Amino acid sequence: GSCRHRCCPGRNNACWAPGARWAHCYCDSYCERTGDCCQDYQATCRRAAVGCAVGPWGPWSRCSSSCGVGSRARSRQVTVPPRHGGEPCPDLKQRRGCLGEHPTCGTAK
């Protein structure tokens, strides 16, 4: 079977071609995990694969609570989106706990 004009990212059962002995072979990037890629998958589909690239993390936000338990967040942007079955993007947001310690916390009732 041939992958010509059939390359698909991810798991896509519509990206198949007739293979040897009446079986199907696949042209999606998932076929590498399952071992049922068409003969020319590497040469035809993976050649143009582009993995995701992300920028640096931004600064942490202020604590969401001025007094007591809250959370901080930070994010980063995708600089190059994945294409043609390339590696997917990692997490773009992070959150962590914090404790608000505004000077008025001790005097609040």
Image (cartoon, rainbow, N blue to C red):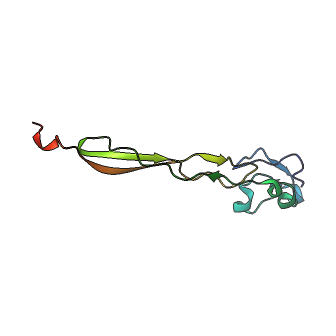
- Looking at the image, which is closer to me, 90 or 31? 90
Q: Is residue 105 left or right of residue 73?
A: left
- The spot of residue 81 in percent (x, y) is 68, 46
Considering the image in quadrants, where does the C terminus appear? top left
Q: Position of residue 21 (x, y in %)?
A: 88, 59
Residue 86 quadrant: bottom right
How many numbered discs, if any?
0
The residue lying furthest to the front in this view is 103
In front: 100, or 103? Answer: 103
Residue 68, quarter of the rendered image: top left
Quarter of the figure with residue 47? bottom right
> Quadrant location of the N terminus?
bottom right
Q: Is residue 95 left or right of residue 102?
A: right
Residue 102 percent location from the top left of the image? 22, 43
Residue at the spot x=32%, y=44% of the render?
63
Q: Residue at x 77, y 54 (%)?
A: 49
Residue 18 located left or right of residue 75: right
Q: Nearer the viewer, residue 82 or 70?
A: 70
Q: Residue at x 29, y 45 (%)?
A: 70
